[in-house]
Image (cartoon, rainbow, N blue to C red):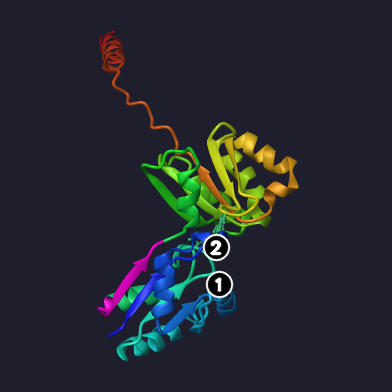
Amino acid sequence: PGRLYVVATPIGNLDDMTTRALAVLAAVDVVAAEDTRHTQNLLSHFGLQKTLCSLHQHNERGRVDYLKALLDEGKTVALVSDAGTPLISDPGAMLVTELRASGYAVIPVPGACALIAALSASGLPTDRFTFEGFLPAKPSNRRSALQRLAGEQRTLVFYEAPHRIQDMLADCVAVFGADREICIGRELTKTFETFISGTAGAVNEAVAADHNQSRGEFVVMIKGAEAEAPSDDLTAVTVDLEALLRNLKS
Ligand code: SAM
């Protein structure tokens, strides 16, 4: 049977297209794309003309059988999303899960990914982090999602939409405190790429003060909570126990 290639594409700067991604896209029989028009433009930019089929959250179920049938005929398929790495806050999870479970070859062709690009230049700890994707849109749900993460010690990474960035930052101040260190990466690899880092309070104010700072695409990163100091002060306990014994005797 054929194979599925999961191909990363640029997140803004077309020069981030890898030579391997271009070779694979040129070679496959079909390109399954989140938005065929968007991918058509990308392929045309690189002089490629391919058979496209759409694969998005509303038709993924039906597409799995269709693509399996293509693979059974020995055809090769590439999966791409509008930007960055497929399946990372993008469609394709159902397809990859089902193909792998059924024993088909699924081959990653790595490249741009907004969360990794942002984290790598953030200055925040990168040895351990947790990617939380998009927070819930509803304000009360967003705040409780953040509250559940308040004690997390790993760096937190979120994707956020421009019309919600200001509210999200305000929630971060409320939940994590104005002093928690955060960094936002905006319009990565594009003309207006900007990093703003500092305390949650300062970053929130900086974005509020300049409307341009809430335009475009965002990765929000929050430093993890400090580890609690281990309580190894056994003498304090001993003293208390002695006092307790004295009280009991008297
Ligand atoms: N699959 C993509 C990836 O690998 O990063 C993510 C797709 S998700 C639908 C889109 C979100 O990713 C945006 O709302 C934004 O939070 C983030 N994003 C994508 N491109 C970005 C960029 N150039 N700069 C900052 N954030 C970006």
Name the quadrant where ligand 1 sits.
Answer: bottom right
Residue 240, given in percent of the width and then of the height, sits at 31, 14
Q: Amino acid at mark 1?
A: Leu
Marks 1,2: beta carbons within 8 A:
yes
Highlighted range, magenta: 101-110
The numbered dot on residue 249 is: none
* Relative to 182, residue 238 above or below: above
Q: Residue drawn 61% across and 53% down?
A: 187
Q: Residue drawn 39% across and 74% down?
A: 24
Q: Residue drawn 42% across and 49% down?
A: 130
Q: Which residue is mark 1?
A: 42
**Quarter of the image with the N terminus in it:** bottom left
Q: Amino acid at mark 2?
A: Leu
Q: Circle 1 — which element?
A: helix
Residue 208, given in percent of the width and then of the height, sits at 72, 42
Q: Residue drawn 57% across and 47% down?
A: 185
In the depicted view, which residue is nearer to us: 100 or 201? 100
Circle 2 residues within 10 Å: few <14, some 14–19, many ≥20: some
Q: Say if disc 2 is inside 8 Å of ligand 1.
A: no
Mark 1 vs 2, N-terminal side: 2
Q: Circle 2 — which element?
A: helix
In the depicted view, which residue is nearer to us: 242 or 39? 39
Q: Which residue is mark 2?
A: 14
